[in-house]
């Protein structure tokens, strides 16, 4: 899908703040997954401590990465093409983890999530453009995120606003795992279902209109942290490659006797 606002986006200089935030999010995820690998595959106590120490922060830098991916969807010439290119890579990640580390198989991780959202936005983004932009829509996405975040616990809502219980039949259908419904036997070492995370991506698509139209402060176009800016430009490639690199480095360190 070619967005009607795309020509304006093409005339703007690069928004370095977005690159830097995306690069920072990827940087955090790489280190978090490094601690995960050392903790669960090699059972190192210090890595286990660091993994659990940083776990509370993980949803925030993951949300930042997803949010900026939503913004980027307004700057893409074809979200369908991007999504269908990414989907085979995501499926390959599932296949490789199933073969090499079956106990830590990734069934619907962030790459699967992003691929599906790119495809959905490519198909239906033109209808979203008919909804006038307002910060109220971004706020609504945030509310819906928290409203659906409790699906794994069997209900919708938060605080006094809740609907429970949800029909158990939803949790007995394996094909609904991608939506956020899963049974007690389901495990995935990386899991980002459409509910609630799709609302983070959707919020990004609304904010992306401002970026595509150049309606953001000029200071956001200036690069302040070049390292994160470069990482942000190559964020997807880094994310795809980082797990094999982490496994290879850990294997090498163990072979030379540095741990294990």
Image (cartoon, rainbow, N blue to C red):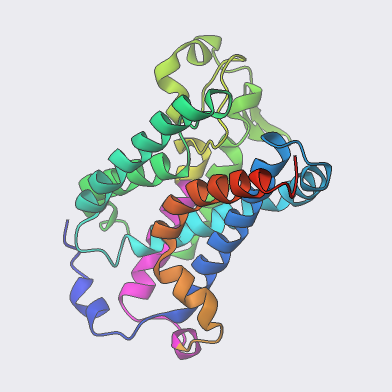
Within the magenta stretch, is there residue 57? no
Name the foreground residue: 20 vs 249.
249
Rendered residue at 45%/13% (across/down)? 173
Above-or-below relation of 216 to 240: below
In what quadrant of the picture does the N terminus appear? bottom left
User: Is any part of residue 127 visible from this angle?
Assistant: no
Name the foreground residue: 243 vs 72.
243
Rendered residue at 47%/44% (across/down)? 110
Magenta region: 199-221
Above-or-below relation of 148 to 35: above
Q: How many marks?
A: 0
Rendered residue at 50%/66% (across/down)? 22
Residue 239, percent across and down?
46, 54
Residue 108, percent across and down?
45, 33
Left or right? Give the position of 124 relative to 208: left
Residue 42, percent across and down?
71, 37
Rendered residue at 30%/64% (across/down)? 74
Above-or-below relation of 176 to 135: above
Left or right? Give the position of 237 relative to 11: right
User: Is any part of residue 13 visible from this angle?
Assistant: yes
Above-or-below relation of 194 to 182: below
The main secondary structure of the magenta stretch is helix
Name the image quarter holding residue 41.
top right
């Amino acid at each position: 899908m070619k967005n009607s606002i795309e020509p304006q986006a093409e005339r703007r200089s690069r928004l370095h703040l977005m690159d830097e935030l995306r690069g920072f999010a990827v940087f955090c995820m790489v280190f978090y997954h490094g601690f995960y690998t050392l903790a669960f595959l090699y059972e190192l106590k210090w890595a286990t401590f660091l993994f659990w120490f940083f776990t509370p922060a993980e949803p925030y830098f993951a949300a930042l990465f997803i949010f900026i991916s939503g913004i980027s969807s307004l700057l893409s010439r074809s979200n369908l093409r991007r999504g269908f290119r990414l989907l085979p890579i995501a499926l390959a990640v599932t296949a490789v983890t199933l073969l090499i580390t079956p106990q830590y198989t990734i069934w619907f991780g962030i790459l699967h999530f992003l691929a599906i959202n790119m495809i959905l936005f490519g198909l239906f983004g033109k209808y979203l453009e008919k909804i006038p932009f307002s910060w109220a829509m971004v706020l609504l996405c945030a509310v819906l995120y928290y409203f659906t975040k409790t699906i794994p616990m069997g209900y919708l809502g938060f605080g006094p606003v809740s609907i429970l219980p949800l029909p158990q039949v939803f949790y007995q259908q394996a094909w609904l795992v991608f939506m956020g419904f899963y049974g007690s036997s389901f495990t995935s070492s990386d899991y980002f279902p459409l509910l609630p995370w799709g609302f983070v991506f959707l919020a990004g698509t609304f904010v992306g209109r401002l970026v595509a139209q150049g309606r953001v402060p000029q200071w956001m176009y200036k690069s302040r942290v070049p390292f994160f800016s470069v990482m942000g430009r190559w964020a997807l490639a880094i994310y795809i490659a980082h797990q094999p690199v982490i496994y290879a480095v850990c294997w090498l360190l163990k072979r030379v006797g540095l741990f294990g």
